[in-house]
Image (cartoon, rainbow, N blue to C red):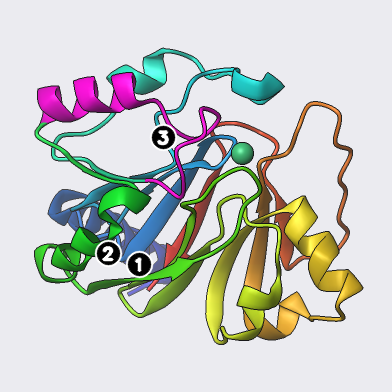
Amino acid sequence: MCSSNKLKFILLNFALILVFNFASGQTNQITVRFIGNCGLYLTDGNSNIYLDFPYKSGAHHYMEYNLAELDSVKNHPVFIYTHRHSDHFSGRLVRKLSKKLDGQIFTPRNAESLKKLNTQLKDFTIETLHTKHQFSFNHYSYVITWHNKKIFISGDTENSDILTSLKDLDWAFVPAWLVRDAMEKKVKLQDISKMIAIYHVGPRDKITSDSPEIKILDKQGERIAIPY
Ligand SMILES: [Zn+2]
């Protein structure tokens, strides 16, 4: 085979592999899409999880979102909330969507029932951590282990002590004030999690990072891929 034929052969194989992977829907990655505030959409291609979404768009002067986001919610959605403040939660919107799309809703009031997801979803466990947030009696942070990837969802908690009980995280989604608290207490986030995403960035916050392990989620619609 001359070299150009060889190249064609390789390219053809490559195309076939791509087509095959595409057709089988086998992506082997968790995709996280940032919607706004602490609103995230997580999917492994089979299950669809929404964290702190839908919330009340623009509440407390935080991020608005395009209403098309509500129409793009997938069938059988799992809605999980850290707490019920309106920049994270809209009871009206989530009940409507859940009814229409045959979903499940979990807030701190029924966080106990989250256990059932451990059997419903493939390679999935969720751990609930009762954490503190000013003006909210009921606030939970979560550690989601999905396809052996460990993802920490902090919500609005202000106290970084919770982080010291965690280790071997792949991704930690935290607000900037938790990062500041951790720095003041000399808690090294990079020792706890391989990657850190800073979310819930406010309109007046100016946050920059030159560290490749820290991603600032200030662009709505941005995606993070977590291969497994
Ligand atoms: Zn908030």
| Whole-number angstrom distance, CA of label 3 to CA of label 2 | 41 Å
- The answer to whether 201 is drawn above or below residue 227 in the figure is above
Q: Give the CA distance from mark 3 to mark 1.
A: 44 Å
Left or right position of 106 against 61: left
- Classify mark 1: residues with Cα within 10 Å, few (<14), some (14-19) or many (20+): few
Magenta span includes 59: no
Mark 3 or 1: the one toward you:
3
* Disc 2 residue type (three-letter): Asn
| Cβ atoms at labels 1 and 2 below 8 Å apart | yes
Q: CA distance from mark 1 to mark 2?
A: 5 Å
Using the rendered view, name the quadrant where residue 145 is placed. bottom left
Say which residue label 3 marks.
53
Q: Secondary structure at mark 3?
A: loop
Of residues 83 and 178, the one nearer the viewer is 83
Q: Which residues are magenta?
A: 81-101
Tell me: 180 left or right of 120: right
Pointer 3 or 2: first along the chain:
2
167 versus 211 height, above or below: below
| Residue positioned 59% across, 66% down in the render | 172
Disc 1 residue type (three-letter): Ile
- Asked whether the beta carbons under mark 3 and mark 2 sit within 8 Å of each other, the answer is no
Question: Ligand 1: which quarter?
Answer: top right
Q: Position of residue 126 (x, y in %)?
A: 32, 69
Pointer 1: what residue? 10
